[in-house]
Amino acid sequence: MIDFRKFKGIIFDLDGTLIDSMGVWERIDVDFLGKRGYEVPNDYLDKITPMGFEACAVYTKERFNLKETPKEIIEEWYSMAIDAYTNVVKTKPGVKKFLDYLRIHNVKMAIATASDNALVIPALKNNGISEYFENITTVKEANRGKGFPDVYDLAANKMGLNNTECAVFEDIYEGMKGAKMGGYLTVGVYEKSCITCEEKLREMCDIFIHDFSECIINDCEKVV
C-alpha cells in the first residue's frame, strides 16, 4: 500500500468516491426522463457523469429534444436532489477515518467535482466533514470536463501544490483518465453503480480500493 502521509495534498472526487450518492442520481434520471416518456439509455450515466451541471443539462436537452431550457432542467434536478444531499446521503466506508488520518499527518485535502456547491456543501455538512477541505473546486470553474486534468490542476493550485505532490481519488473512468493525463498518482474507488467500468478503472489507476480504511498505514506495516 502507498503511504499517503508522504503526499502534501490529496484531491477527492465527491459523488461515488467520498459519498454514496450515485443511487440518488440514478433515481433522478429515471424519474426525470420517465416523466417525459423516455427510459434511461444504457450509456447515459457514462456520458453525463464527467460533465458539470450546465454541460449535462445542455446535453440532456439536445439528446432528448426537450422543450425546457438548460436552466429549467438544472432547477428541476436541484429540487429533486437537495433533500437527499442535505439529509440522506452518507459517506462511503472508511472516509471519516481516512480524513482524520490525513489531517493528523498534515496532508492538505481538496475536492474536485462535477457537482455544484449547492449540493456539495450540504452533503459535507450532513456528514460532518466540511472543515477538512482546503477548497471545493467544480468542473464549472475549469476549462474542460473530467476527461482532462484541468479541475484537478486547479484544486492542486489552490492548495499551493503541483501534480507530483498530490494523489487523486476517483470512481469513474473519465475522471481517472483526466487525472492520469495530468500526471497524478491515482486511486480508483469501488462504486457499485460502475461495475461495468470497474475493469477499465482498475487498468487505468495506480491502486484500487473498496474501503478507505485500506489506505491507512499502521506504524508497524511495511510501506512503499
Image (spheres, helix red, strand yellow):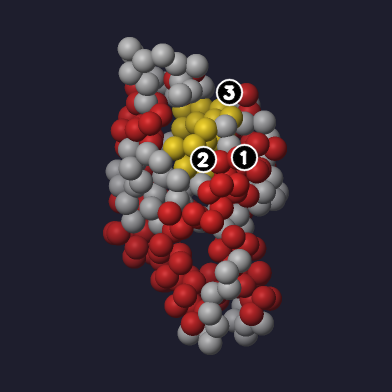
- Mark 2 against mark 3, which lies toward the viewer? 2
> Hey, what amino acid is under mark 1?
Met
**Dots 1, 2 in contact, CB < 8 A:** yes
Q: CA separation, marks 1 and 2? A: 8 Å
Mark positioned earlier in the residue sequence (2 or 3): 3
Q: Position of residue 155 (x, y in %)?
A: 57, 37
Left or right of residue 4, residue 211 in this image: left
In the rendered image, which residue does mark 2 sit on? Answer: 188
**Secondary structure category for the residue under label 1:** helix
Which tag is nearer the camera, tag 3 or tag 1? 1
Residue located 33% across and 18% down the image: 218
- Residue 89 location (% of width, % of height): 34, 56
Count of marks, rendered view:
3
Q: CA distance from mark 3 to mark 1?
A: 19 Å
Residue named by callout 3 = 165
Label placed on residue 204: 1
Circle 2 Cα neighbour tier, 10 Å, few/some/many (<14 / 14–19 / ≥20): many
Do residues under tags 3 and 1 come within 8 Å of each other at their CB atoms? no
Kindly report the distance in space between the C-alpha atoms of the residues bearing marks 2 and 3.
Answer: 18 Å
Asked if residue 23 shows in the view, the reply is yes
User: What residue sits 48% from the left and 23% below the top?
Assistant: 2
* 93 w.r.t. 126: above or below: above
Q: Is residue 81 above or below residue 153?
A: below
Disc 1 residue crowd, few under 14, some 14–19, many 20+, Cα 10 Å: some
- Callout 2: SS: strand
